[in-house]
Image (spheres, rainbow, N blue to C red):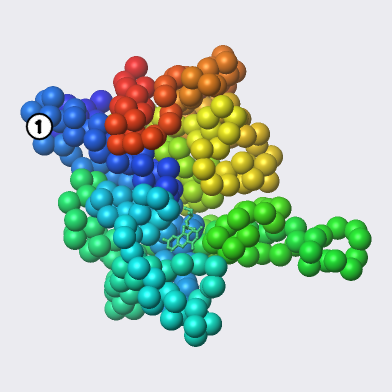
Amino acid sequence: MTGRTGLPRVVVLAGGVGGSKFSLGVRTALNRRADAEAAAPDPFTIVANTGDDLWLSGVRLQPDVDSIVYALAGVNDTVRGWGRAGDSERVNHELQQWGAGWPWFTLGDLDLGTHLARTGWLREGLTPTQVLERMSARWPLGARVLPMTDAEVDSIVTVSDSSASAGDLDGDIERPMHFQEWWTRHRAALRPLRFDNPGIGAAVAAPGVLDAIAQADVVLIAPSNPVVSIGPILAVPGIRAGLRATPARVVGVSPIIGGQVVRGMADVCLTAIGVETTAAAVAAHYGARSSEGLLDSWLIAEEDAASAAEIGRLGIRPVVAPLWMRDAATSAELAEAALRAAEF
Ligand code: FO1
């Protein structure tokens, strides 16, 4: 149950905004435990979703990776939840004047610095893992951030676009689009029929991911979108099997509080895959380790305590805890509750 110094070796599976806040909380909780042990904390590992990634205006964006790195570095835009704090948009404005890129998608100037550096290194032949290692060296992140895979497996949403089939009355036109267009342009208003990550079947986990999971004491599934953030991570060949095989305890945190998603479009995504927007339904979706699933424990909010018995019957141990991450303190308390849930 312990790493070098009695501290747990921790792996976090994370998406963007929720994943970043939760990862900050995990870092604080582990640092506190290290202080209590008068030991230096081992950096924990964050496996980041890369399904949000896209090519735009000739540069490669990795939104969830960047949200996590920027948040750990303390340079993230905490209001928007993505991009850099205090960024400007001079280049973006010029791109719009050229009709380049997407008019509904904002690329900040500092953020473009990241995308240009990344794209240059990719063109030199570095892998996304090597690029992320270089980016991470700029700041003391206190965690090792890994992409889930080095393959390009962008999330594609197939929508039922009745507007496209205005003429015929029966059925809708099915139209695939990049997740980022569906979300940033249409705000998830076009009904999604399914979500895919083309090519993910041939992908392999990025170097270090499977070893980190196998050697972990605790794997934490962040309260990210189960479909478009955690889903792609679990779809990388080998990762789901690695989670079922690891001696680590697997603890998930519900992204649903009181039957509502905290932010984003997880409810629309869950409905599309036939999962109710409840803490218990998402637990069932991930499944119990004792029956082909992933979870040992599942953290739910006080507002959802009534579903604890139902979750228990799934073979998953429900743990009631405050789930709102309003600030650094509440994020750290949530992370500590998740770590503690792994200890018994
Ligand atoms: N989200 C938006 O809603 N609008 C944007 O214009 C936008 C730009 C953007 C640029 C870089 C980046 O890394 C993320 C960006 N996001 C934007 C967020 C992005 O859609 C995220 O993938 C989602 O928020 C889900 O995590």
Q: Look at the picture and state if 338 lies above or below 150.
A: above
Image quarter hosting the N terminus: top left
Ligand 1 under 8 Å from disc 1 Cβ? no
Provide the secondary structure element on which disc 1 rests.
Answer: loop
Q: Look at the picture and state if 263 lies above or below 160.
A: above
Q: How crowded is mark 1: few (under 14 residues within 10 Å), some or many (20 or more)?
A: some
- The percent position of residue 24, horizontal first and vertical second, equals 30, 41
Question: In the picture provided, is 278 more to the left or to the right than 321?
Answer: right
Of 235 and 277, the residue lying toward us: 277
Q: Look at the picture and state if 269 lies above or below 283.
A: below
List the residue tagged with mark 1: 39
Question: In the picture provided, is 57 more to the left or to the right than 178?
Answer: left
Residue 122 lies in quadrant: bottom left
- The percent position of residue 31, horizontal first and vertical second, equals 18, 34
Q: Residue at x 34, y 24 (%)?
A: 337
Find the residue positioned furthest to the left.
38
Of 161 and 328, the residue lying toward us: 328
- The percent position of residue 78, horizontal first and vertical second, equals 36, 49
Looking at the rendered structure, the kind of residue marked 1 is Ala
Q: Can residue 314 be seen in this view?
A: yes
Q: Residue at x 30, y 71 (%)?
A: 113
Q: Is residue 213 visible?
A: no
Of 253 and 200, the residue lying toward us: 253
Of 308 and 71, the residue lying toward us: 71
